[in-house]
Amino acid sequence: MSDSTWRQGLQLAAAVLLSYLTSTALRLPEGFWAVMSALIVVRPSTVSTLGAGWDRMRATAAGAGVGLGGVWLQDHFGFDSTAAVLGTIALLAAASAWRSSMRNVPIAALIVLSSGAMAGHSALQVAGLRVAQIAIGVASGVVVSLLGVQWNARARFDAACASALRKMAEHVVSDLGARTPPAHEKEAAAAELRLALRELAVQAASADREARFWRRLSRCWRELPQRSETARCVGLARLTIRTAHDAALLGRLADSATMGRDDPAWTSLAQAANRALSTTANSIEGHGPPELGLLRPFAAKVTLPAGELQAPLAPPIPWIAPAARLLMQDLTSLAGRAAC
């Protein structure tokens, strides 16, 4: 289990405890409504939690207003409670389809509308108490996330991106080696890389969301001019996934080649691709530009003059050249986009 999974689990547990203890300390009945709200709000990163908390707050305000109005109508005019609840929730659920951020409106309204009179409290008072518990749950989730100090989503994404590139570098050396790895080892390595790339895509969305949050906050405080918000990390994640396909293509071409796997050209190609991938990973982490010089001869375009191929100009493995060019282009784009 990854560190991020452990961290989110601990955040959820802390938010549950904080929301329940706060409700208990304030002597609010039915404290589990606060717990449920905290579970809905907490997200893997602080910015995600703040966004969910804001959406939840807006949904709570709208849903609670509708719910309180429904309870008041039931209390004063004696409307049938079941028909009123079902009709109101159905209308809110249909209306929430227009704005995804307000999909919690029918949930909040249902929590309030389903409240009944308790000993010492009228139905309207119980509805108000449930609104207070939802607010406690949202606040608990935001506080726990802020204490977790998850503001470095971009740095974590860059580290994960570099780690994925280093995995590709190891796979290239294995795939192009003199000994073909067993099928089960190749499948296990490919599955591990696919999992890393899926997690990378999730981290990219979180990092870009955090970057947008800081840009908007800076504009509010410093009155900066509004600029187009480019999804830097999402673009890097897509390039990394494309690079993984290009690197794997080298291994597939080697498997279908008639040239022996013990040929020195394969070893040279493996070293060149490994060096290019590893130094690009270092470049993403801010440790200098990528070194693509060793890979460049394998990507060279050669024109056949009058049916004759000059040996000094020929790439070591001619049919590898298109795949090597694709890999070089993606690595160059990765390094350039990471520097933005």
Image (cartoon, rainbow, N blue to C red):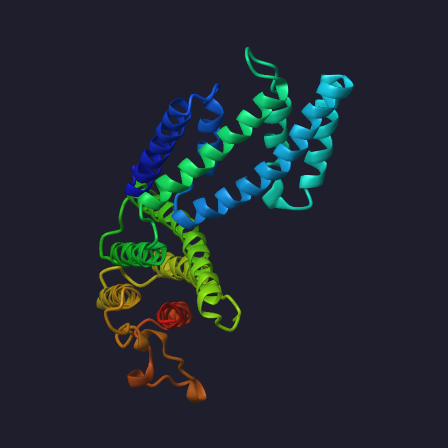
Residue 77 pos. (x, y %): 78, 20
Residue 204 shown left or right of residue 169 in the figure? right
Q: Is residue 218 visible?
A: yes
Report the residue that reaches farthest toward the front. 120
Q: Along the line of sight, which residue is nearer the eye, 65 or 261?
A: 65
Question: Viewed as shown, does residue 117 lie left or right of 300?
Answer: right
Q: Identify the residue shown where x is 43% and y is 88%.
A: 305
> Which corner quadrant holds the C terminus?
bottom left
Task: Please indicate whether residue 173 sits to the left or right of residue 242 in the image.
Answer: left
| 321 or 86: nearer the viewer | 86
At horizontal 45% and vertical 33% (from top left) the residue drawn is 136
Front-lying residue, 302 or 35 = 35
Image height check: is 160 above or below 321? above
In the rendered image, which quarter is residue 112 located in?
A: top right
Total numbered badges shown on the rendered structure: 0
Q: Position of residue 113 (x, y in %)?
A: 64, 24
Residue nearest the viewer, comparing 318 with 45: 45
Q: Position of residue 231 (x, y in %)?
A: 48, 62
Q: Is residue 222 above or below residue 47?
A: below
Viewport quadrant of the N terminus: top left
Residue situated furthest bottom in the rendering = 306
Whether residue 175 is visible to the viewer of this picture, yes or no, is: no
Residue 187 horizontal/vertical position (percent): 34, 43
Position of residue 64 in the picture relative to residue 53 (left or right): right
**Image point (33%, 71%), residue name:** 317
